[in-house]
Image (cartoon, rainbow, N blue to C red):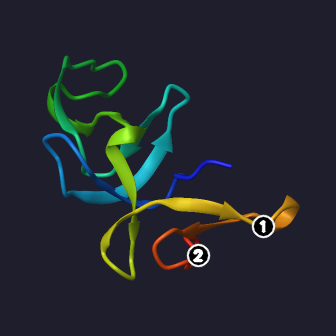
């Protein structure tokens, strides 16, 4: 069970976007994640009329290392770690600081 999952609210702990918060859009297998409105880059695209793609400069999210993000605890509004409690089908994630459930 991963500590950070798709749909979690996270905060960036290091880098040029330090302090920004966002929702995890995708977890990649190489230890990176796509976070909404974090690590934005400009991508220059060429027009392709056959596919209906307009050319220009697009702004999109680039993947960020999982080690540079942390779960955002809504009770404290700070970065927090999670631990896994329970066994079998009763496993759930809880914040280490106050013991509240991550998903609740």
Q: Give how far across and how far down residue 21 sits, in percent.
A: 27, 60
Judge from the rendering whether residue 42 lies leftward or rightward of residue 5; answer left or right.
left
Is 42 in front, or is 97? Answer: 97
The structure residue drawn at horizontal position 34% and vertical position 79%, both measured from the top left corner, is: 76
Between disc 2 and disc 1, the foreground one is 1
Estimate the spatial distance between the alpha carbons at disc 2 and disc 1, rounded to whole Å. Answer: 12 Å
Q: Give how far across and how far down residue 14 sits, in percent.
A: 22, 44
Q: Which residue is mark 2?
A: 101
Q: Secondary structure at mark 1?
A: loop
Q: Which residue is mark 1?
A: 86
Q: Quadrant of the C terminus?
A: bottom right
The structure residue drawn at horizontal position 50% and vertical position 25%, both measured from the top left corner, is: 30
The correct choice, above or below, for 48 with respect to 11 in the image is above
The quadrant holding residue 65 is top left
The correct choice, above or below, for 41 with respect to 4 in the image is above
The quadrant holding residue 93 is bottom right
The structure residue drawn at horizontal position 21% and vertical position 57%, both measured from the top left corner, is: 20
Density class for disc 2 (Cα within 10 Å; few <14, some 14-19, many ≥20) is some
Is 9 in front, or is 41? Answer: 9
Q: Are marks 2 and 1 in contact (CB under 8 Å)?
A: no
Q: Give how far across and how far down residue 80 sits, in percent.
A: 40, 64
Q: Give how far across and how far down residue 101 sits, in percent.
A: 59, 75
Q: Earlier in the sequence, mark 2 or mark 1?
A: 1
Judge from the rendering whether residue 53 lies leftward or rightward of residue 3; answer left or right.
left
Is 43 in front, or is 12? Answer: 12
The correct choice, above or below, for 58 with respect to 77 in the image is above
């Amino acid at each position: 069970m991963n500590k950070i999952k798709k749909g979690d609210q996270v905060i960036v702990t290091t880098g040029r976007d330090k302090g920004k918060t966002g929702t995890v859009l995708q977890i990649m297998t190489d230890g990176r994640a796509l976070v909404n409105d974090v690590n934005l880059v400009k991508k220059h695209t060429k027009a392709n009329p056959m596919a209906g793609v307009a050319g220009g400069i697009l702004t999109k999210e680039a993947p960020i290392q999982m080690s540079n993000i942390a779960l955002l605890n809504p009770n404290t509004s700070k970065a927090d770690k999670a631990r896994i409690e329970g066994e079998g089908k009763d496993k759930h994630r809880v914040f280490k600081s106050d013991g509240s459930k991550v998903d609740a």
